[in-house]
Amino acid sequence: MSVQEMESEEAPDAMREVYDYTVGLIGLSGPTSDVCMELLGSGTLVRTKDCYGILTASHVLRSRAYGRSEHLGIPIVARTAHRFSIPKSQLSPIIIGSSENEESGPDLAVLQLLNHKDVEEIEAHKSFWGLDAHRVAVLGTSRVPDSRLCILAGCVGAWTQQRLPDNNFENLKRFKAIFLDGIIEAPFTREGFDYVDFPVDYKAGVYTGRDDIPSTFGGVSGGGLWRLTPKRDERGVTYGDDPVLIGVAFYETPVVDQKRTILCHYAASVYDCVLAALESGKTVQ
C-alpha cells in the first residue's frame, strides 16, 4: 500500500500541517499475498486526554466495504510504499449521528483506537489534533468567524492508482489526497447539529495554477475542513496560515452550472458532539 499525498517540500506550510493530521481509510481483506484494498473514505486523527481516534463520516463506517474488511489500512508515510493496518477488533466505531437522508445529515462518527501500540506507530509519522485543547478557542469564533478561508482535505477515490509490484509488495496501490482551498458559506444548524457548505467552482481560472480539481470527490467523505488565518507576505500576497479543524465533509451535490457544494459538519458538531462521544465511548444518535 502506497500513498503520495503532496509534494512536502513544495506545499504551503498550512497544507503540510493539515497533511500531518489527514489519513485515508483503506479496507483490507483477503490473504496477505493477494490482499484486496478499497478506499473507504478519509479521516482526521483526533484525541482527547488519553483517548485517540479517527474522525470521519458515519456512512464510511456503515458501508458494505467497511463491513467486509478484515483490517483497516492507514497510509502514514508519504511517497513511500508501506503497509500499516489495524485489525478491526482493535477499533471501536462510535456513531455520533446517522441519517437515511444522505444530503441532510447528520453523518458523523469517530473510530476509536483501542491499542496504544497502534497509536504509537501512527504518532511516529503523524499527529493527533487535540479536540479538548482547542474547543474553547474554536467555538468562541465559529459563529462569527474572523475568516471563511478554509482547506478541505481528503483522499480522492478517482486518483487511486494500481502500481507495478516491487520487492516488498505484490499488490501495490497509490492513494492520493487533495488539499483544496476555498471560501465557506454561512454556517447553519439543524436538529442539534451544525453544518457549513464548501463551494467548488469548475469554471476556468477559479483555482489559479491548479488543474487537478476532481470531477467527483468520492473518497473525501470523512475528511477534515480546516479554517485558515489570512496573512500577507512581503510582496503583499495574501495566503492562509495557522489551520484549525472546524468540520467534516460528508456529501457532494451534483454539478450545476459548473459548480457543486461539499456539505460538511461544522464546529459545534465536532467540538461538542464528537468530543462528548469520544470521552464517553458511547454512540450518540
Image (tube, grey):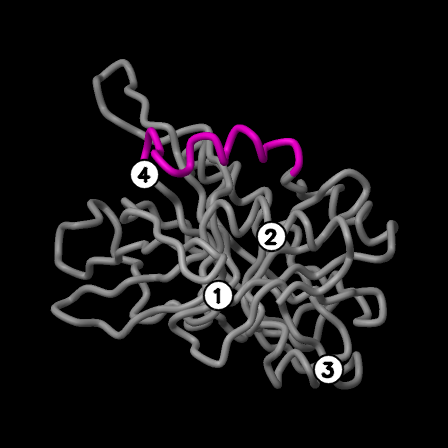
At 64% from the left and 77% from the top, the residue drawn is 37
Question: Which residue, given by chain and number where applicable, does mark 1 sit on?
Answer: 221
Residue 41 location, quadrant: bottom right
* Secondary element at tag 4: strand
Q: Decide: few, some or many residues near mark 3? Use Cα within 10 Å; few <14, some 14-19, many ≥20.
A: some
x%, y% of residue 228?
Answer: 39, 34
Q: Decide: few, some or many residues near mark 1? Use Cα within 10 Å; few <14, some 14-19, many ≥20.
A: many
Kindly tell me whether residue 14 is visible in this rendering: yes
At 39% from the left and 70% from the top, the residue drawn is 104
x%, y% of residue 167?
Answer: 73, 67
At 41% from the left and 49% from the top, the residue drawn is 179
> Which quarter of the image is occupied by the C terminus?
bottom right
Please, is residue 277 above or below residue 139 in the view? below
Name the amino acid type tagged 2.
Cys
- Which tag is nearer the camera, tag 3 or tag 1? 1
| Lower sequence index among marks 2 and 3 | 3
Residue 64 location, quadrant: bottom right
- Taking depth in this image into account, of 90 and 158 the one nearest to the observer is 90
Q: Decide: few, some or many residues near mark 2? Use Cα within 10 Å; few <14, some 14-19, many ≥20.
A: some
Q: Which residues are magenta?
A: 132-147
Name the amino acid type tagged 4.
Leu
Please, is residue 105 above or below residue 137 in the view? below
User: Residues under labels 3 and 1: Cα distance?
Assistant: 21 Å
Name the amino acid type tagged 3.
Ser
* Secondary element at tag 2: helix
x%, y% of residue 224?
Answer: 50, 51
Question: Which residue, given by chain and number where applicable, does mark 3 sit on?
Answer: 29
Residue 140 on the magenta span: yes
